[in-house]
Image (cartoon, helix red, strand yellow):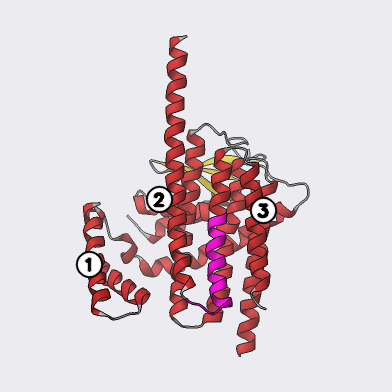
Amino acid sequence: MIILLLLLAAAWLLWSGLFKPLLLGLGVLSCFLTFTVVRRMGYFDNELFALRLSWSLFGYWAWLAREVLLSSIEVARVVLDPRLPISPSVIEIESTSKRAFAQVLLGNSITLTPGTLTLDLHKGVLRVHALTENSARGLMSGEMDRRVAALNPD
Amino acid sequence: MLYYAVITALLATTLLALVRAILGPSVYDRVLAVNMIGTKTVLLLAVVSFLYGRPDFLDLALAYALINFIGVLAVLEFFRSRAMREAAEAAEAAEED
Amino acid sequence: MDGLLDIVSWLLLTTGGVFVFIGGVGALRMPDLYTRMHAASITDSIGPILIIAGVMLQAGVTLPSVKLAAILLFLLLTGPTASNALASAALLAGTKPGGSKTPAGED
């Protein structure tokens, strides 16, 4: 909880860049307002996931950035091909991790990667729309799922 | 000089998305196009702030990103409730037959 | 050293612009909603990454760089969320995704 307050205060100071008493007062007020709203929404009843797995998350982001670049090139090639060689399909994959955060991260990563799009996430099963055969096959190899599950072991 | 190429690309993409928004055909295509235009606007603001050397444009970009996200979600929620109501009405009409 | 940084930044900006433009072309060319969303996802993911990285190299280690990083993080978190909301709303309204249940030629 303290970490969240410190983060909010740091963000306020960074963005305003002014140190007049009035603005600082407003900053303190809005920090506590945000804190109260977030607490009433039940944020602290769940795990403080984002702050706890910060370090391994950067490694995952680096891998994801490479993946995004590769599949972007692939989708760009498909778009520029005059024949438009698409073969859309809907596949279902199951998330290894049972945690809500890991499943949301997986769904978001799938959508972020061009060529695959999460349609639905229900009870750990993701329905994914894939643009080409290649992107569907890449997803079904399950490497992304493995990496997400390794980020946040049960 | 550095920035004009990327600004041209962003503006051209905005134009393409605008054409998609006009062509439709479904309302979801239009929402998709509007969302694309929003993302392009954020990037455009970020680039323009460096072209003119005015870092305060970055705050505008962030605010625009926030408003764009909330706006798209609000519009989608609106159309979703309409689709659900229409589906319920269709089911009712089928029952009466 | 400054020249090298400029060249890398210019390269990032230009490739970002090219990818964004290709995504726009794809959003026009693709036949149905879900395939259009794939094209739009190019402009939502690789475009911001490359362009903001390019601008960040111009800014150096300054306050604007931090703000740019915040914008990038926010775009990358909300973009997929908005896409997912769009896809699920369209699915609920009865827009059928084209294509088979399993990828062709997989069996």
Same-chain check, marks 3 and 1: no
Choose mark 1 or mark 2, whichever is in front. Answer: 1
Choose mark 3 or mark 2, whichever is in front. Answer: 3
Q: Quadrant of residue C47?
A: bottom right
The chain ID associated with circle 2 is: A
Element class at badge 2: helix
* Residue on which disc 3 sits: B16
CB within 8 Å, label 1 to label 2: no
Element class at badge 3: helix
- Compared with B16, B7 (above or below) is below
Quadrant location of the N terminus of chain C in the rendered image = bottom right
Quadrant location of the C terminus of chain C in the rendered image = top right
Q: Amino acid at mark 3?
A: Leu
Label 2 CA crowd tier, 10 Å (few <14, some 14–19, many 20+): many
Of A144 and C78, nearer the camera is C78
Q: What residue range appears in magenta?
A: B37-55
